[in-house]
Every structure is written in structure tokens, then in C-alpha cells.
Amino acid sequence: MKRIPPVLAAVGVCGALLFNQSCGAAPDSTPIKIGALFSVTGPASFLGAPEEKTVRMLVERVNASGGVNGRKLALVVKDTAGSPEKAVSFAKQLIEEDKVLAIIGPSTSGETMQIKALCEENKVPLVSCAAAETIVNPVAKYVFKVPQKDSQAVTWIYRSMKDKRITNIAILSSTEGFGVAGKKQLEDLAKGEGITILVDEVYDKQATDLTDVLTKVKANANVQAVVNWSIVPAQSTVAKNMKQLGLNVPLFQSHGFGNLKYVQQAGVAAEGTLFPAGRLLVVDELPDGHPQKKVLAAYKQDYESRYKEDVSTFGGHGYDALMVVVEALKKAGAPDRDKVRDAIENLQGFVGTAGVFNFSPADHTGLDLDAFAMLTVKGGKFTLYRK
């Protein structure tokens, strides 16, 4: 009987036991599915469209460099058109049918609040691109967000008012989730910051003319400034209607104003508008040693050269949401929902477009007051506000 050489015998055994750990299982090359809910179309498309474009660009880049832990990413995008009902339906599909590792988005606070419990119940990490602080306050184990906090934005606005010796104001807010959350923060923090609210008006989120609301503001001669807290279309409408009425007091907007399209729609009426935002919109004004400058400059260059449009803070939220998941996945070592959740909660020093993130069990936003700067509109462009 012919004897089989030892080396060939070993190869035969290993071949027969291909999936046995003693010979090493074949690595899993199945793409890792990441779900995304964005308002690509509809009234909130100024938010969702740049988020979707950004995330697609980043996934291509990650996959071209070998993926994460040797596996490619598979992006599953659903266009909610800004509808909370669609957001719930699509979130269920992503969780139950697509079996995604995590969900990024939605674009708006109202949508996020509608799917928050769903993600929590199914133990699916959610990294929202919406800003309302109620998304993470109180903390929910599987829910995170990447835009700065409402309370931080209000603090910046009120302290900037004090620099301008403004104490008596009017606040306007819309009926959608972001507007409701912002209104509460404006009211809750006013007294502590020495601000008196003389007029407090709420308007429909789809309003395209706010002349009646602003006429009430103008009737109060003691109002020194207006704060508007909303998303489209009111951010442009308020500025235009104020100019038409001759309401010549400073206009402060929320951190949701960070898209030049709002300025373009308002035209010259937007000049001088003040709002807190991350530094993406003014990256060219940052010193070379700023910890975010390299990341911001690279993202701005990549996005604008590819899509031939101005970068916005909303696209930046898409950047941060995806890259937070990517960084967590690297640290987790495997596409396990619980391990990725734990990795996000312990992610420290991650440089994103909104700031430097330091998450913790008590803070699922991970950004401090320094993540903001005060910006203004000058010559149709955003620039740092200087006292």
C-alpha cells in the first residue's frame, strides 16, 4: 500500500474540515448593512438630500479602502420625505427585513422621536441627524444623535444678546418637533440668562407667510430682537417678512440655519442674521492648528467637488452619524449590535464636523458648548461673528 506523505495528509484533513476552527474558518465577507432614513425629498430635503449624498460618498470611500474589519458596507437608504409615518414604516423594514446593524438618521426631530422607542425595543443602535435635545434627554440606551444640543444653541444666542445689551425679545417657533423642543429651551433658559420674553408665538410648520405673526411682534415697541426656531420654509420667510414690515431689530436663528440655500432664498433680508453653528461653514477662517480643520477642509473639498454645491451642516450630520458607526464598528471588532452600541457610548476624542465627540453613558450627544461658534451672514455668505 502506497504511503501518503504527511504534508498531503494534513492538507486532506484540513480540506475535509474546512469550517473547523483547528484549520481556520473562512472569513465572513458578507457586507455589513447600515440603514439610513433621510428626507431626500419633500419640505425637509434641504436637510436630507445633503445627508444622503454625503453618506453615499463616504461609504464608497470606506469600501474602496477595504471596508471595516475586512468587510464592505452595504448602505440601505429609505427616503422618508420628512414623514414620521414613513419613518416608522421604513425603520421596521430596516430592522425586520434588511436586518441592519444600525440606523443613521432620520433628518428631522419629529421623525426621530417616532422611531426612538422602536429602535430601543429592538436593540438597534440609532444615530440621529436631528437636533432636538429630547432625542437623548432622557438617555435611551440605543439612541444617540450628532448635532449639538438645543440648550447649548440657546446659551450661545442669549450670551451673544447680552454682548449686544439685548434683554427683551420675541421668540417664534414652528409646530414640528424641532420647533417645539427649541421653544421649551428658549423659555426655560431665559430667566437664568437675564432675558425677558415679551412675545411668544407659534406658527404652522408649513407656513409660507408670517406677516401676521411678525405684525404682533412689531406692535410691541420694547422688543429688541427676534429669535426664530424652525426648519424650512420659515427660516427664509421670517427674514423676508421682517424686512417687508420694516421690523429693524436683530434676527437670531437656531443652529438649523446652516445651509446657504436659506440665505439665497431670503436674499438681502438675510444679511446680519446671527446663529450658532459648527465650524464647517467657516473652515477657511480657522487657524491651521484647530483640531477640526483637517477633517472639515477635506470633507468640504470632497463634497463640493463631487456635487457642485455648497457644503452644509446637515450634510455634516450625515458625515458624523456614519463615521461614528464606522469607528464604533472598528472598536467592536464584529458587527454585533450590542458591541457597537457599547463602542459608541464609550467613543472618545472622535473628530467630526460638528465638533470633537466624547460620548458617555450620561451623554449620548458627546459635544460640549465649545462645539458651537456664533456665525452671521455677510455679503450672502456665512462668516464668524465678531463682537
Image (tube, grey):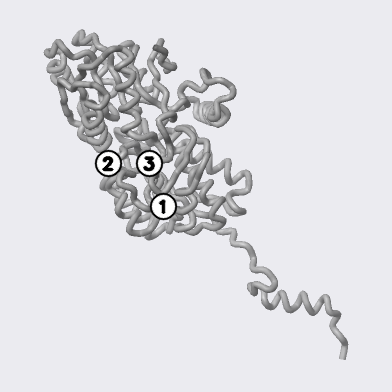
* Front of the two marks 1 and 2: 1
Q: CA distance from mark 3 to mark 1?
A: 16 Å
> Which residue: 78% across, 77% down?
10
Residue beneath disc 1: 125
Looking at marks 1 and 2 on the same chain, the residue that comes earlier in the sequence is marked by 2
* Front of the two marks 2 and 3: 2
Provide residue 204's location: percent of width, then percent of height: 18, 31
Provide residue 218's location: percent of width, then percent of height: 15, 13
> Which residue: 30% across, 22% down?
158
Other-residue count near label 2 (Cα within 10 Å), few / some / many at <14 / 14–19 / ≥20: many
Other-residue count near label 3 (Cα within 10 Å), few / some / many at <14 / 14–19 / ≥20: many
Picture disc at residue 38 = 3
Left or right of residue 221, residue 62 in this image: right
Residue most extreme to the right: 2
Secondary structure of the residue carrying numbered label 1: loop
Q: Which quadrant, please, contains the C terminus?
A: top left
Please, is residue 344 above or below residue 169 in the view? below
Left or right of residue 170, residue 25 in this image: right
Picture disc at residue 361 = none
| Disc 3 + disc 1, Cβ < 8 Å | no
Left or right of residue 345, residue 227 in this image: left
Specify whether residue 306 is in view.
no
Q: Nearer the viewer, residue 287 or 45?
A: 287
Residue type of the residue flagged with mark 1: Pro
Looking at marks 2 and 3 on the same chain, the residue that comes earlier in the sequence is marked by 3
Residue type of the residue flagged with mark 3: Phe
Other-residue count near label 1 (Cα within 10 Å), few / some / many at <14 / 14–19 / ≥20: many
